[in-house]
Amino acid sequence: FTLTLVNYRALLHEAGQIGPLERSLIYATITAFIAVVGGFVAAWLLTQRRTRTTSTKALDFLLLAAIALPSVVFAAGYIFAYNLPVWSRIGVNLYQTAQLLIIAYAASSLPTSARVLVGAVSQLQPSLKDAARTHGAGGVAAWSRGVLPVVSRPIVMAWLLTFCGVFLELPISQLLYAPGSPPAAIAIEDNLSNYHFGVGMAQAVFAVGIALAAVLIVLGGYRLLAPAGWRRIGGATRG
């Protein structure tokens, strides 16, 4: 048994072009932002008891159904839907594109993000925003000063959950990735399937390292940059 870094050097020499790891990093970052924004809106709609309408109940059902649906079935549905000739006739050509892959990532991640945020959003009181407006803050400032501090920590956690889940996602990627542009999970699987174990394992180690680095950077940035009041809200209390 000989320890060698030749496979890691080969991956580093590919720097300067967008490879599978960089591609997955971009996909995961974009998807995390989309899923957090959409998840927050969905969580807010689910917690509006006064406006509990049929549409809200339908949204709740769809979110639960999406969580229960296997990823392979979910991706196959996108193939059947966006491979229809009618889309080409109206100028929509999403099949076998990175855009469709990101849409599928976001749609599969949004239900989980909404469930992560629904607890924090349900605790929001209209008086928080009203108090900020009373002190002269505008609509955006009132939300950022009265609402965002309460949900900042759950939003960060939801973002990280989506990012890490998408970064090495395999079933949806297998069916929907654009030809010639494989994400990290596909590249790792291809190398291992073709008996390029060294390169495949090096990619896997790099991918796990990138995911861990992203978690450390985001949590560390929140701890260093977020106001002290934001960090205390939702934190563990000492007895």
Image (cartoon, rainbow, N blue to C red):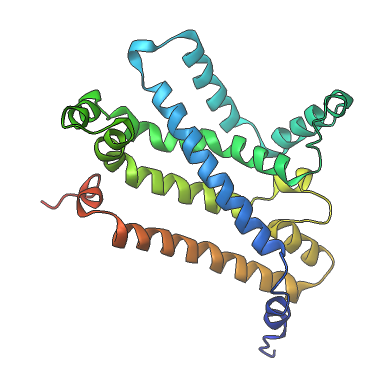
Q: Quadrant of residue 97?
A: top right
Indicate the quadrant containing the N terminus: top left, top right, bottom left or bottom right: bottom right
Q: Residue furthest top?
A: 54
Compared with 6, 193 (above or below) is above
**Can residue 43 be seen by looking at this rendering?**
yes
Q: Which residue is painted at 66% across and 43% down in the image?
A: 102
Q: Residue furthest bottom?
A: 2
Give coordinates of residue 233: x percent, y percent: 22, 45
Q: Is residue 168 visible?
A: no
Residue in the foreground of this view, choosing between 149 and 188: 149
Residue 216 vs 162, above or below: the answer is below
* Residue 186 percent location from the top left of the image: 74, 56
Is 74 above or below relative to 216? above
Can you give x and y, in whole percent of width and height, for residue 91 in the image?
82, 29
Q: Count numbered badges in the picture.
A: 0
Q: What residue lies at 53% left-to-right and 15% top-to-bottom?
A: 58
Which residue is located at x 72 percent, y 48 percent?
173
In this rendering, would 185 be left or right of 88?
A: left
